[in-house]
Image (spheres, rainbow, N blue to C red):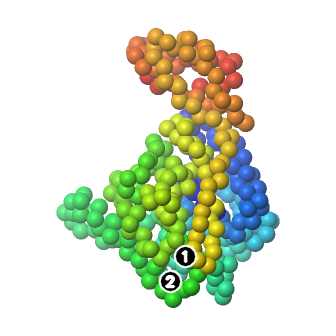
Amino acid sequence: LHTADWHLGKTLEGQSREEEHDLFLAWLLERVSEHEVDAVLVAGEIFDSGMPPQTAVHRYFEFVSRLRERGECKLVVIGGNHDSANQLEAPVPVLEYLGARVDGRVKEEPAERILLLPDSETPRVAIAMVPFLRDADIRKGRAGETSDEIRKSLAEGIKKKYEECAQTLDGLSCPALATGHLTVTGMRSSDSERAIVGGLGDVSHRGFPECFGYVALGHLHRPQSPDEGRVRYSGSPIPLSFSEAEDEKEVRVLDVAPDGIKDFSLPIPRFRNLVQLKVSFDELESRIVEFSPDASELTPWVEVVVEGAIFGDELSNRVRELAEGKGYEILKVVR
């Protein structure tokens, strides 16, 4: 099962997302049992920051232990650009005992990047573990480089890491998939994503060797694929900003057979509706009075974008007064 970009510890306009994350993780555990999942693969961004709150760390370890209680399902995690590699890898001896493989940073030796499941003696799938690649992982900078030269050097360095993994797989008879946490050229972003090296690290989907029957990516929060399926972002499990309010969130389930890999979507329920309401200043009162977002398990959150508002008007207070008692919460008012 391919998922990514959990961002445990994330807030939105100062509001905690813990309830949504708890509901998602409980839902995920049920899907693991329902679909007899052998491994849960998280393609980066377990946490929202390199120093997550202890509640987020507790939530992560609680999931690890609950997953272990459900049998032999493995947890496979790569680090993202928000994650601290040191923090992810500090508990590795304990996590390995619990059936988890966590690579916060890329292994130097290509052979060490390959994870064989269920084991190395009778492998049914090979996974190339390629976490977020920092500048120092893939190139040596030179004085006076232009942005175009840096961009080209980064793309070539990323491509080389995957080619090294592919070469290591020569002679292996089982299907292979790769992981990654990066930006593929031409994909849709949202305003909740942190730019990677100033946007200079974009790569073409054609740069992933053909030996990988599936490339499980993280970083972009919208589920999408540049090539109709082989290279795919699962997206984040909850909308992390109002720009993702209309996105249909999902995880991907991969069926690995000797002749290849097939995948399908499992839609994630909307535990809390996020809604963008765009109104003109003249229609503000009537639109707010009649506005009623779809119900969700948790109270809907709304961002109101007001066009033509007069500066100096107490807009935020006015909108919140109009919405009082309406069954949703105004989180943000944008002039």
Q: Nearer the viewer, residue 94 or 122?
A: 122
Q: Residue at x 43, y 48 (%)?
A: 188
Asked whether disc 1 touches disc 2, contact meaning CB atoms under 8 Å apart, the reply is yes
Q: In the picture shown, does residue 50 fall above or below 107?
A: above
Q: What element does badge 2 sit on?
A: loop
Q: In the picture shown, does residue 308 fall above or below 86?
A: above
Q: In the picture shown, does residue 70 fall above or below 297?
A: below
Residue 268: x and y, percent? Answer: 66, 48
Residue 247, labelled with which disc?
A: none
Hey, which quadrant is residue 167 in on the image?
bottom left
Q: Residue at x 65, y 17 (%)?
A: 324
Q: What element does badge 1 sit on?
A: strand
Find the residue positioned furthest to the left. Answer: 144
CA gap between label 1 and label 2 equals 8 Å
Please report whichever mark, 1 or 2, sits nearer to the chain's N-terminal start.
2
Find the residue positioned furthest to the front. Answer: 259
Q: What amino acid is at disc 2?
A: Leu
Q: Is residue 69 rendered to the left or right of residue 205?
A: right
Q: Is residue 304 visible?
A: yes
Q: Say few, some or many: other residues with alpha carbon within 10 Å of mark 1 (under 14 / 14 to 19 / 20 or more).
A: many
Q: Which residue is mark 1?
A: 176
Q: Residue at x 67, y 19 (%)?
A: 326
Q: Say few, some or many: other residues with alpha carbon within 10 Å of mark 2 (under 14 / 14 to 19 / 20 or more).
A: many
Residue 11: x and y, percent? Answer: 58, 41
Q: Is residue 86 visible?
A: no
Q: Which residue is mark 2?
A: 169
Which quarter shows the C terminus? top left
